[in-house]
Amino acid sequence: MRRYFIAGLLVWIPLGITLWVLRLIVVTTDQTLSVMPIAWRPEALFGFPLPGVGLLVTLLVVLLTGFAVANYVGRKLLALGEQLLVHIPVVKSIYGGVKQVSETLFSNEGQAFREAVLVEYPRKGCWTVAFQTGVASGEVAQHLGPDHISVYIPTTPNPTSGFFLIVPRSDVRELKMSVDNALKYVISMGVVAPLEPASPMTEKPSVTELPSR
């Protein structure tokens, strides 16, 4: 009986969590319909609510916004709006910080979370999986030297919280596993083993050369 019960849990736990996350996304995005006129909402048009319409509307708005700012006129309008925001005392700090982080994480030029590494944490001899988020620059580089990198160490099993560290590049070991596989490894607390590394033809350049033994 115990074997069958565990087999059932292995089916329903990931399925249940997946459905719960999807429901949370749908319910959250459906709240965006509250900004629409009442006459345009599904309850008024069809006589009953339609779950998921808010998600479709949100995706459509994001796509249309991306299309608009991809041309010259849209970029000019966006720049004008940002100029107005940066003159508002509190708003400029929030908007500027969030915009900088977003561009770093999601833009093609950004280097954040592009590479999984091993670092010694929380003490010598203990290793954990981390993600390189950048290199030391500015005043930090003046104090520590340019040969330092920034890493984010996620907590388990919730990787959205963690620790930010600046460590010497020589103390970091690059992993060949992808960021997705590294996240699975962290979230599963090491239960889900990462896939085999890529072949030598597709290997990325190493962060640091490992000492020969």
Image (cartoon, grey):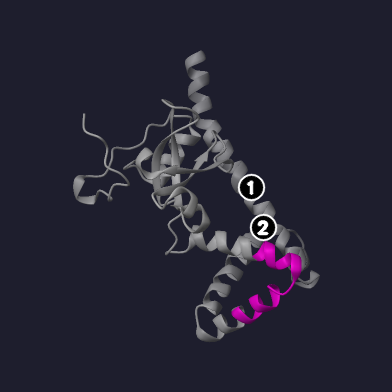
User: Measuring 78% from the left and 72% from the top, which residue is drawn there?
Assistant: 37
Task: State the image quarter where residue 162 is shown.
Answer: top right
Q: Nearer the viewer, residue 206 or 15?
A: 206
Locate residue 174 relative to residue 10 in the image: left or right.
left
For label 2, the SS is helix
Is 81 a magenta residue?
A: yes
Measured from the top left, where is residue 61 in percent x and y?
A: 61, 70
Locate residue 59 relative to residue 34 in the image: left or right.
left
Q: Which segment did they paint magenta?
A: 79-95
User: Measuring 55% from the left and 36% from the top, which residue is drawn there?
Assistant: 155
Q: Which residue is mark 2?
A: 29
Q: Residues within 10 Å of mark 2 (few under 14, many from 20)?
A: some
What secondary structure characterizes most of the magenta part? Answer: helix
Q: Residue furthest bottom?
A: 73
Marked residue nearer the N-terminal end (1 or 2): 1
Q: Which residue is mark 1?
A: 23
Answer whether residue 40 is visible to the viewer in this image: yes
Answer whether residue 46 is visible to the viewer in this image: no
Q: Nearer the viewer, residue 147 or 202?
A: 147
Does 195 appear above or below 93? above
Measured from the top left, where is residue 48 in percent x and y?
A: 75, 59
Locate residue 196 relative to residue 56 in the image: left or right.
left
Q: Amino acid at mark 2?
A: Thr
Q: Residues within 10 Å of mark 1 (few under 14, many from 20)?
A: some
Q: Residue furthest front?
A: 143
For label 1, the SS is helix
